[in-house]
């Protein structure tokens, strides 16, 4: 049994009524007795969300399962993934034709039960047929509409419908008047056209003069702008040269001031490191001193050799004298 909320009163004093949704009860095919009928509570359908109000042609009906079940979606994705993996495994396990050797290539071969000849040239045959000659179209008969109505005739005597002497002068007056009037209009139109042509000619001459004046002013303005650009470029070039000259003068002054103390220090350092030397001193240090030291070493070696030889001789003589002295004793 559905729960029916009691009637409530809002702050504004209006009554509201709402009820929870409930399933439809099973009813018997035939009406039950009054004593056996179950008592059920009914709600106001005007406030039931299941009742659609207004135009239902463009009503957007939301299905009962608007959002898919995530478990079902995951299961379908797993099945699809397994199918793809099984298909890939079957393709890998399938025996394939080995690659062709170097210099050869595979060709397509028919494996059907009934072979069919393959050819790039399509067999064609020419077939001719002759049609009957065209027959001349017969002449179309003249169209004569069917006669309708009744024929009636009358007799007109001379002078009954038209009197020349009485009616022709009026016609002549009209024709002559219209002719003269048309002639006058044509003359006036020609004079007006001549005036328009003269006015157009004057306007054309005035426009040509104005165009020439405009062209002259444009050319003058172009020459002035060109002269202005040339003067501006010349002034910029002059300022650039003046700036370069000022920078060169400042650089020269700074260089002179910087090199005033730099040159003596550089020459002193170079002289101390031996880059600037006296040729005689350098010749004595590089040539004379090595030769002198070599000669001194040679003379000392000779002296040391002579002393060693003299010491050896003296030692031999002393030993011989000592031996002789021992023999005499």
Image (spheres, helix red, strand yellow):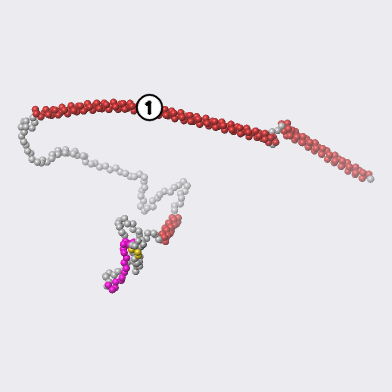
**Residue 90 is at least partly visible in this image:** no
Q: Nearer the viewer, residue 153 or 45?
A: 45
> In this picture, is 316 found above or below 67?
above
- Figure quadrant of the C terminus: top right
Q: Main secondary structure of the magenta part?
A: loop
Q: Locate residue 161: give its quadrant.
A: top left
Q: Is residue 71 left or right of residue 278?
A: left
What is the span of residues highlighted in magenta in the rendered image?
A: 34-51
Q: Locate residue 80: give its quadrant.
A: bottom left
Q: Residue at x 36, y 62 (%)?
A: 11
**In magenta segment, residue 47:** yes
Q: Is residue 175 left or right of residue 195?
A: left
Q: According to the image, label 1 marks what residue? A: 213
Q: Locate residue 309: give its quadrant.
A: top right
Q: How many marks?
A: 1
Residue 120 location, x and y as percent? Answer: 36, 45
View extreme (bottom): residue: 35
Residue 299 location, x and y as percent? Answer: 80, 36
Q: Residue at x 35, y 64 (%)?
A: 9
Q: Residue at x 10, y 41 (%)?
A: 148
Residue 260 location, x and y as percent? Answer: 65, 33
Q: Nearer the viewer, residue 156 or 243?
A: 243
Q: Residue at x 33, y 62 (%)?
A: 14
Mark 1 element type:
helix
């Amino acid at each position: 049994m559905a729960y029916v909320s009691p009637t409530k009163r809002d702050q504004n004093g209006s009554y509201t009524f709402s009820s929870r949704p409930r399933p439809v009860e099973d009813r018997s095919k035939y009406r039950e007795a009054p004593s056996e009928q179950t008592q059920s509570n009914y709600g106001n359908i005007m406030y039931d969300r299941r009742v659609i109000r207004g135009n239902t042609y463009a009503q957007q009906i939301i299905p009962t399962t608007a959002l898919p079940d995530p478990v079902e979606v995951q299961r379908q994705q797993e099945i699809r993934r397994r199918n793809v993996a099984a298909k890939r495994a079957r393709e890998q396990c399938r025996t394939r034709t080995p690659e062709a050797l170097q210099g050869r290539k595979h060709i397509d071969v028919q494996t059907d039960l009934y072979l069919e000849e393959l050819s790039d040239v399509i067999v064609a045959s020419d077939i001719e047929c002759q049609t009957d000659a065209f027959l001349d179209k017969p002449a179309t008969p003249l169209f004569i509409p069917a006669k309708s109505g009744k024929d009636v005739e009358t007799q007109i005597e001379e002078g009954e419908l038209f009197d020349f002497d009485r009616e022709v002068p009026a016609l002549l007056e009209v024709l002559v008047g219209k002719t003269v009037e048309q002639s006058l209009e044509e003359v006036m139109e020609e004079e007006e056209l001549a005036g328009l042509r003269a006015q157009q000619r004057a306007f054309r001459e005035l426009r040509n003069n104005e165009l020439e004046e405009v062209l002259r002013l444009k050319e003058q303005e172009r020459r002035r702008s060109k002269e202005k650009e040339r003067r501006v470029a010349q002034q910029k070039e002059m300022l650039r040269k003046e700036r370069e000259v000022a920078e060169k003068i400042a650089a020269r002054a700074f260089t002179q001031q910087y090199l005033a103390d730099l040159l003596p220090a550089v020459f002193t350092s170079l002289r101390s490191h031996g880059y600037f030397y006296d040729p005689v001193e350098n010749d004595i240090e590089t040539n004379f001193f090595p030769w002198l030291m070599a000669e001194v070493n040679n003379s000392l070696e000779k002296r040391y050799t002579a002393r060693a030889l003299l010491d050896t001789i003296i030692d031999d003589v002393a030993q011989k004298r000592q031996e002789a002295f021992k023999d005499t004793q």
